[in-house]
Image (cartoon, rainbow, N blue to C red):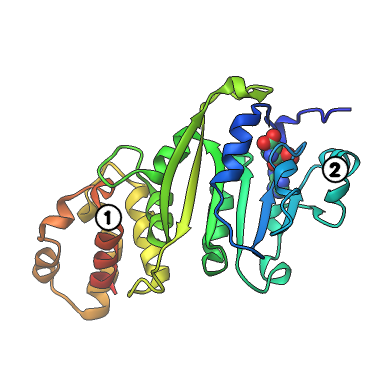
Amino acid sequence: MEVRAKKALGQHFLTDLKAARNIVDALETSPGASVLEIGPGMGVLSQYLLEREDIDFKMIEIDKESVNYLLSHFPKAYGRVMEGDFLRLRMDALYKGPFSIIGNFPYNISSQIFFKILDCRDMVPQVVCMIQKEVADRIAEAPGTKTYGILSVLLQAWYDIEFLFGVGPGSFCPPPKVQSAVIRLRRNSRTSLGCDEALFKTVVKTSFGQRRKTLRNSLKPLVQAKAQREGWTEEYMANFTAAPIWELRPERLSVEDFISLTLQLS
Ligand code: SAH
């Protein structure tokens, strides 16, 4: 018995075994590495990962029917598959050391998955995942492109990101309405941003919240808050935002530019 695809869970099962193999091969692991698969479904990726004796492999799957499928088709899945919601998983309770993440992510929650990974980025050295191509483009994109956005900046601050390959709808059952792509994220060497991290996030989110506006306009509330704290005159405030960077729209700014803005606004 196959698993009946549930739309609400983002279930599109990959049927292209060559693509599945390539995804698994894209994950670089050293002996003894811990690997967590998000949303194994019917195990198209897991079947290869379960064969690997050199890694500590676990899976988390929200769908009971998929969990039962895995257990009845792969004896090695016993003790390795958790039934549950990745977004609620206490990763620090499950792992004491680093673990890499792999998966054909449920597209409807891929951004939430990335935000959760960012929250424990120092434990996650690598992520190989399939997501909607549009999101992959956005995440892997350099500044200056139309799709560059909040997630691009926040992920690029901590990860080196590679676009690996695209996968068409025909490689899935049922086929999704969108194109898919596989990306690899590798934790970069950054240990700190060198600025207040909460403010950095606020600056990035506020800027992209009104992405058609210049930073001078979109970040006005943050500049005003600083002006009030420091007791600036109107004139001083106007001078403060006279530099060319304030004339730009957020999609033109690199991670370093956002750090510099954050330092100015601290
Ligand atoms: N890896 C499989 C399935 C991909 S579809 C394949 O490539 O064929 C996405 C999978 O994620 C589904 O099995 C779905 O049930 C599961 N899923 C959806 N939301 C989840 C969540 N919050 N936590 C864990 N798994 C989830």
Residue 119 appears left or right of 77: left
**Quarter residue 92 falls in:** bottom right
Q: Is residue 192 above or below residue 68?
A: below
Taking the spot 54% from the left edge, 46% from the top edge, the residue there is: 26
Q: Which mark is residue 74?
A: 2
Q: Which mark is residue 94?
A: none
Q: Residue 259: percent from the left, percent from the top?
A: 29, 66
Q: Residue 159: percent from the left, percent from the top?
A: 43, 58
10 Å crowding of disc 1: few (<14), some (14-19), many (20+) = some
Q: Which residue is more in the foreground, 33 or 66? A: 33
Residue 121 appears left or right of 12: left
Which of the two discs, 1 and 2, labels the residue nearer the N terminus?
Answer: 2
Residue 82 appears left or right of 154: right
Image quarter hosting the C terminus: bottom left
Taking the spot 47% from the left edge, 39% from the top edge, the residue there is: 135
The amino acid type found where label 1 is placed reads: Ser
Q: Secondary structure at mark 1?
A: loop
Q: Is residue 235 above or below residue 23?
A: below
Q: Residue 6: percent from the left, percent from the top?
A: 75, 31
For residue 109, say whether it is visible.
no
Q: Which residue is more in the foreground, 2 or 165? A: 165
**Quarter residue 198 falls in:** bottom left
- Give the alpha-carbon distance from disc 1 to disc 2, as whole Å: 45 Å
Image quarter hosting the N terminus: top right
